[in-house]
Amino acid sequence: MKTNKQTSCADPYENDSISVNQAKKKIIEEVTPIVGVEKLTLRSCLNRFLAEDIYSPINVPSHINSAMDGYAIAGDDLPSDAPQDYKVVGTAYAGKPTTSTIKVGEVIRIMTGGVMPAGTDTVIMQEQVELIDDTTIRIEPQHKVGQNVRQAGEDIEKNCLVLSKGKQLSAADLGILASLGIGELRVYRRPRIAFFSTGDELRSIGETLAEGEIYDSNRYTLFSMLKNLDVEILDMGVIRDTREDIRTAFINASEMADFVITSGGVSVGEADYIKPTLKELGDTHFWKIAMKPGRPLTFGKINNARFFGLPGNPVAVMVTFLQFLQPAIYYLSSGKTKQTITLQAKCASKLYKRSGRTEFQRGIFEQTTDGTLSVKRTGKQGSGILTSMSIANCFILLNEDCDGVEEGQMVEIQPFAGAI
Ligand code: AMP
Ligand code: MG
């Protein structure tokens, strides 16, 4: 942990805070990947995580075939230095192999995907031949033996490992599995994620706001970010801040879910029932993370469920979800960690920042005419300014050591790219 030289009276908790990376590491250490498996048909497997290694039962393609519409010929019968005429003695369509065979001076008309007829190993594109009459074509010299032919197993060889256990299945993967004739797969069950909001000031949509009350927006951002991850979502609503309600909600959630997420009520010094209830029910750490926004975070365990108490402020909810929960859910689903891709961009304006904590400022990045990336801040950066997350397409990641950025300096950005 980095020591903080800047601790002030206004910030009495910095000395016992942990870094973003330490928090990420501790969370992954505590998560046990899902072992439950289900068998699903291919179409239902998109975005799911494979629970088995897949070996290819066949060659793809399964036979040597033509990559073009044209004429199949024997390579050693190609014209060497002058154009030559050939007799067309049959046709091979894709899926309808021909039984015709060739002799010297003969070719077979072939369509893309057609099995190469016996004795042929080369295809001349139809655009490159001259039609002399109904059954005769002329071929120019300078073609290469073996051209325009796809070999059996060229994409996937029989018996090779095609997809490994833990792989998240993409559109390309479903296509590959279909090309192998595999219609059912064993995948891990979806993670079950329960969440609820706490706070006596919160009202649900449809209710009237009394003075000092606000609508609960965190459940909607959480729902949406979870939806993007293809998990089983258990929305438990707004839980009143009474000891009994909180206790019941925690017990119910931990019995149903792998992860329980709450927002609000973890600020330092808050008088509510979250902390005492968690202490009573489970093994829980109240972390101060050297980051902005999102400093207070509770992480722990109730029964078999892992518990994440996110801060209440709407931007802090999104930041902590993306930094901690998204990788944790990925690990829960696959047993694998995923690299977070960051890019370098030129900062369009001066950024103020204090060293000693990681900041996730909201930015808009774009590609400039010279192909490089440029990023600007979205404006107000308060942790309650949810519109900043709507306008932004990336975080500007300012690490603990950074104490400000000058205009034109390069900064690290983390694109949202489908995550929010
Ligand atoms: P807390 O962490 O409970 O002290 O909340 C910090 C700030 O976030 C307060 O201004 C809360 O009103 C606000 N907040 C807490 N929960 C929500 C929620 N579910 N939706 C919107 N704002 C919230
Ligand atoms: Mg609260």
Image (spheres, rainbow, N blue to C red):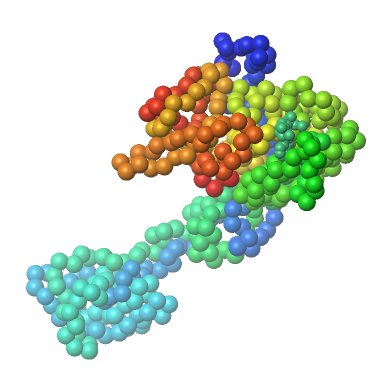
Residue at 39% across, 64% down: 152
Residue in the image at 77% along x and 21% along y: 269
Across and down, in percent, residue 179 comes to 50, 64
Q: Nearer the viewer, residue 339 or 358?
A: 358
Residue 232 visible, this orientation:
yes
The single residue placed furthest to the left in the displayed view is 82
Furthest residue to the front? 211
Q: Nearer the viewer, residue 164 or 7?
A: 7
377 is higher (above) or lower (below) than 87:
above
Q: Position of residue 279 (x, y in %)?
A: 83, 26
Residue lying at the far bottom of the rendered structure: 134
Residue 336 sits in quarter: top right
Q: Position of residue 285 (x, y in %)?
A: 74, 25
**Quarter of the N terminus within the rendering:** top right
Residue 13: name its quadrant: top right
Q: Quadrant of the C terminus?
A: top right
Q: Nearer the viewer, residue 369 or 278?
A: 369
Residue 93: where, in percent of width, then height?
37, 79
Left/right placement of residue 244 relative to residue 133 reads: right
In what quadrant does ligand 2 lie? Answer: top right
Q: Residue at x 88, y 38 (%)?
A: 245
Horizontal side of 250 relative to 413 (left or right) equals right
Identify which residue is drawn at 15% across, 66% down. Answer: 142
